Image (cartoon, rainbow, N blue to C red):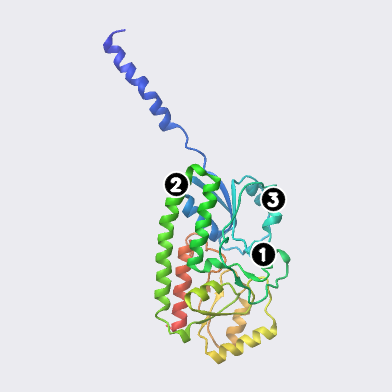
Amino acid sequence: MSLTTRRPLLAALLCLPLLASAQAPSAAPVRVVASFSILGDWVRAVGGDRVAVDVLVGPGSDAHVFQPTPAHARQVGQAQAVFSVGMGFEGWLGRLLRTAAYQGPQVIVSKGIAPLRNRAGGKGHDHDHDHGATDPHAWQSVPQALVMVGRVTEGLCQADAAGCETYRANAARYASQLRELDAEIRAAWATVPAAQRKVITSHDAFGYYARDYGVRFLAAQGVSTESEASAQGVARLVRQIRQEKVKALFVESIADPRLMEQIARETGVKPSGALFSDSLSPAGGPAATYIDLMRHNTRALVTAARGD
């Protein structure tokens, strides 16, 4: 074989490893499970393309009344990490983990957050959905969400140490967006006099929002959507709405609207729309991400409180 013939052949052989590398499939994503849609959104924001997220309680669904199926047990059994809020929010999760014989990391993202007390006493119908003395809805405050996103990052690093640098970079970018969101919410409420910052909601899911943004929420139910409002409690709330001239009344996206419709009839306060408390909206809706949810709720609340 002549030198002229050998050179093209040698060049082709040297290119083969590069071609094989370019065509080789990328590593399989890390499979994780998130308990509900808001937490799933955080895990996707931090995990990016390295992570495949299965969400147990999807958009538009209520974690308080969730009943796991064998399909959910299979998802958990295949996961490399399971993410939950804790603080009694997912009362069904322990049973699901046992059913799936799950032995991997369980990341409780509320670790390090000082919980608020449940003002309603946490009395639900079913012990699986009873939050007890703790209010678990910490995601309704962006500063608390920042803490939980930090726990998500730690959990992903535990499950996939090779991707930790990527997770930390993604988390830093997302945390910057959350800090901007927090400032935006505070600026919006600064336009509302303190005396007008009063809102009626169907269940008591906004305690952390109330504390951190200076808003007063009155609720007909407790922190669980399974809690029933008593006739005496509703009558007391109606009197309070009339006495304090509350203008903002909201039905939550996952709640039965009939109770709030009754309160609206008795007080003459027209419902101001829907809030998203424990669930994102389906894709294309007004609260398809956590950031969208907080912006939607704040716009609706501020507009109603101002009486616009």
Mark positioned earlier in the residue sequence (1 or 3)? 1
Task: List x then y, in percent, for residue 117.
Answer: 62, 73
Q: Nearer the viewer, residue 90 or 276?
A: 90
Residue at 63% in and 73% down: 118
Q: Residues within 10 Å of mark 1 (few under 14, many from 20)?
A: some
- The residue furthest bottom is 243
Q: Which residue in the structure is indicated by mark 1?
A: 65
Q: Which residue in the structure is indicated by mark 3?
A: 70
Q: CA distance from mark 1 to mark 2?
A: 37 Å
Task: List x then y, in percent, for residue 220.
Answer: 62, 79
Q: Quadrant of residue 121?
A: bottom right
- The residue furthest top is 1
**Element type where label 2 sits in the image:** helix
Q: The residue under label 3 is which amino acid type?
A: Pro
**Element type where label 1 sits in the image:** helix
Q: Nearer the viewer, residue 257 or 111?
A: 111
Q: Tell me the quarter of the image containing the N terminus.
A: top left
Which dot, 1 or 2, sits closer to the camera? 2
Q: Quadrant of residue 307?
A: bottom left
Q: Is residue 157 left or right of residue 88?
A: left
Residue at 62% in and 44% down: 78
Q: The residue under label 2 is which amino acid type?
A: Glu
**Element type where label 3 sits in the image:** helix
Q: Nearer the viewer, residue 199 or 170?
A: 170
Q: Residues within 10 Å of mark 2 (few under 14, many from 20)?
A: few
Q: Quadrant of residue 252?
A: bottom right
Q: Which residue in the structure is indicated by mark 2?
A: 165
Q: Residues within 10 Å of mark 3 (few under 14, many from 20)?
A: few
Q: Nearer the viewer, residue 220 or 47?
A: 47
